[in-house]
Amino acid sequence: MGQDGSILVGFNVSGLLLAGGYTQNNMFGLKIGYEKLVHFLIEFLINEKSAKVLLIPHVFGSPDNIESDSHACEMMFEGLRSQYQGRIGLVRGRYDYNEIKYVIGQCEFFVGARMHACIGAISQNIPTALIAYSDKFSGVMRAIGLEGLVVDPRRMEEDEIKQMVDRIYNERGMLRGELKKRIPLVKQTIQNAL
């Protein structure tokens, strides 16, 4: 928690979704444009929840790489920083998985569109809203009993998405406790399967 009592929210922006997928034409069939969705959720978190938002890339690459979260986060930051001065930040540079997982671990809530970024948060008991663009998200989360964290903009309208993120955010204390109980069991199940 910040000195002003604000919650630090990590927000992973997907370069692939921002580009509209490999086709660059809403390949994943989102009902709301991804850029609009990101703006909408950041505005909601900052204005209605008084949170501070840290944009966290998970896939690093140059601006010409369609997969580059670092470029997508940079674009979002540049577009929003004057409006939300002191309330929005950006992770710059290149990091390996463990380093970026450490950064994610500093957050009290996480919103992400990259499955591995979300798993990095959940594995550290951080309440997470997963922005799904494939059924894989629901399948993985259902397998560990956390399908209630999946927000699917392919099937949900803006109001529904807001309500769901709001619920997950408001239940973050209870969810953190649930994750502390559940994650060691999940890790043990994975170890036993190896």
Image (cartoon, rainbow, N blue to C red):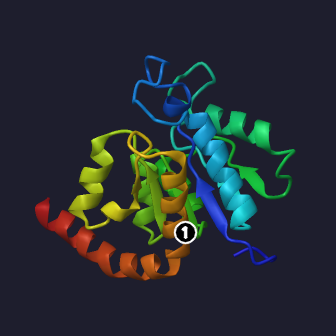
Residue in the image at 30% along x and 76% along y: 182
The amino acid type found where label 1 is placed reads Tyr
Percent position of residue 87, x then y: 79, 58
Tell me if I can see residue 122 in this picture: yes
Residue 52 shown left or right of residue 114 in the figure: right
Percent position of residue 174, x then y: 45, 82
Relative to the observer, which residue lies in front, 64 or 16?
16
Residue in the image at 48% along x and 45% along y: 157
Which corner quadrant holds the N terminus? bottom right
Q: Which residue is mark 1?
A: 169
Relative to the observer, which residue lies in front, 97 or 30?
30
Residue in the image at 38% along x and 43% along y: 155
Res 194 quadrant in image: bottom left
Tell me if I can see residue 69 in this picture: no
Number of numbered callouts drawn: 1
Res 123 quadrant in image: bottom left
Residue 68 shown left or right of residue 194 in the figure: right
Relative to the observer, which residue lies in front, 11 or 45?
45
Percent position of residue 96, x then y: 51, 46
SS assignment at label 1: helix
Q: Name above or below for residue 72 compared with residue 148.
A: above
Percent position of residue 186, x then y: 25, 69
Q: Name above or below for residue 121 compared with residue 2.
A: above
